[in-house]
Amino acid sequence: MEEKVRAVLDRVRVNLQADGGDAELVEVTDDGIVKVRLTGACHGCPMSQMTLKRGIETAIKAEVPGVQSVVSVD
């Protein structure tokens, strides 16, 4: 599952990087929680939770069965 999540995240990261931000995969837990660290312009951005849920989480859940949620960690 981690490889599939990483592949989707790599595709999404291109858009984040275009705006000066980024996201790195920290962990995929056994119960389907994907932990990412938002960096650059994404770290602390008021829109980061929308980016996380509507952008990153939506893309990953659409392509990787078993993912329950995507959360940001510091």
Image: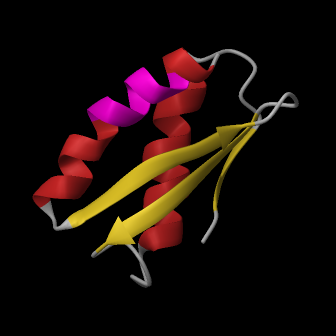
Residue 10: name its quadrant: top left
Q: Is residue 52 above or below residue 65?
A: below
Q: Which residues are magenta?
A: 5-11
Which x, y percent locates residue 59? 46, 32
Q: Is residue 9 left or right of residue 62?
A: left
Whether the magenta-drawn stretch holds residue 60 is answered as no
Q: Is residue 47 above or below residue 57?
A: below
Q: Is residue 13 left or right of residue 7?
A: left
Residue at the extreme right of the image, as rendered: 31
Residue 29: name its quadrant: top right
The quarter of the picture where the C terminus appears is bottom right
Q: Is residue 63 above or below residue 11?
A: above
Give the residue at x 45% y 71%.
48
Q: Is residue 8 left or right of residue 35?
A: left
Which x, y percent locates residue 62? 54, 23
| Magenta highlight: main SS | helix
